[in-house]
Amino acid sequence: MAKQVTEHEDFKKSPDSLNSDAIELSNVSDLIFEQRARWLKIRSLVTAVRERIPAPVDHMGCHVLPENVLKLHSIASQNLQVLLSLLLSSQTKDQNTFAAMQAFRAYFEPDEITPIGILATDESTIDQLIRGVGFHVKKAGYIKKIAGLLFNELKGQIPNSLPELIKLPGIGPKMGILYLQNARPYPGSDQLKNQNDDSFGLAVDTHILRLSQQWRLVTLPSHSSVATMTPELARAQLEQIVPREQWKEANPLLVGFGQTVCGARSKRCSDCDVSGTGLCSADQLNTTSAKRKIKQESLKIKDIEDLHVVKKEINHADQIVVHGRSLRPRKKKK
Ligand code: SF4
């Protein structure tokens, strides 16, 4: 009889051991195996691109704390700064979130950022400090409310479970997961200490939502009550496909790829190792018209209409110069 393996045990296995145990894992659907193989291929291609092309998330992501903060600020303040960065990051580029946090830090210097310090600061001042981020007025209100909850009800400590975290104003599942993966245990507390930080979940943002659909890693179930794929639906499917030990790294890997190579409106398919593999439904080099366009561009003649004129004229002249290039007509065979 095939060995019964729980879903949890399955996720702990490496891809290699999964392959060798494939016959025994009869309770894991073929689809998940296929999708996992697809993910592993994509992951290795994307990793190669990311090694060549650094992204803002690498040095300005919410998890990145400046050196002086790491040296001089308490764990409680560092955790609060990670949470505030995450709160500011929604609908906002990493560069703007980082700049707003730096303004926030400069305002509080030489003191660290604490709930008491925030409660003593006017909401309008906080709004001014973070005005470079999206929805800054709303977020200034959330920051004050979070500081109040921390001071009055939570003994200064940010909750260490996802259900508790998403009760905080302005904090959604993606932010909660990223916080848990990056926060440090409070001194003298077992919070987070005994938990594997890869086990909290796979945080899905707008880049990951888009990429996982165009790579056909996730699909909207036919019985779905919603019309379009949501981050939480995508997360549920991705957590089935992506091995648990890769959940934490998957977020910055894919977010950085979305920031630099494959954005919603700008896709650098010619720099992308996924292009031409058949794994991407949005591959712009995979269409006949795109191939034709590239061929034309390779002629280095800017205006394609000129090319047709040149073709006509070239039959009637010995030498024609186009955009500084000398073109000679082919001699007809006699
Ligand atoms: S759309 Fe182009 S750049 Fe984006 S993943 Fe597909 S092949 Fe790569």
Image (tube, rainbow, N blue to C red):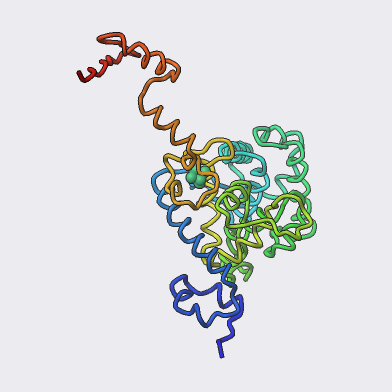
Q: In which quarter of the image is the N terminus?
A: bottom right
Q: Quadrant of residue 232?
A: bottom right
> Residue 32, percent across and down?
57, 68
Residue 29 in percent (x, y) is at: 59, 73
Closer to us: 288 or 13: 288
Tell me the residue at 60%/75% (across/down).
8
Q: Of 65 and 334, which appears nearest the observer?
A: 334
Up the image or down, 38 lies above or below 281; here it is below
In terms of depth relative to the viewer, which is nearer, 86 or 232?
232
Q: Residue furthest top?
A: 317
Of 126 and 61, the residue lying toward us: 61
Up-down: is 183 above or below 261?
Answer: below
Question: Residue 257 placed where, x, y %?
Answer: 50, 46
Q: How many labels does the image show?
A: 0
Residue closest to the far left: 334
Left/right placement of residue 183 relative to residue 223 reads left
Instruction: Give how far across and how far down residue 141 sits, in percent.
Output: 78, 42
Q: Please, which residue is most extreme toward the front here?
A: 334
Look at the image and tell me in which quarter the C terminus lies: top left
Q: What residue is at 55 percent from the left and 87 percent from the top?
A: 2
Q: Is residue 60 visible?
A: no
Instruction: Please tell me whether residue 241 is drawn above or below residue 85 in the rendered image.
Output: below
- The residue under the point 32% across, 13% down is 314
Please say whether residue 264 is visible from this viewpoint. Answer: yes
The residue at 53%/51% (across/down) is: 252
Q: Is residue 145 left or right of residue 131?
A: right
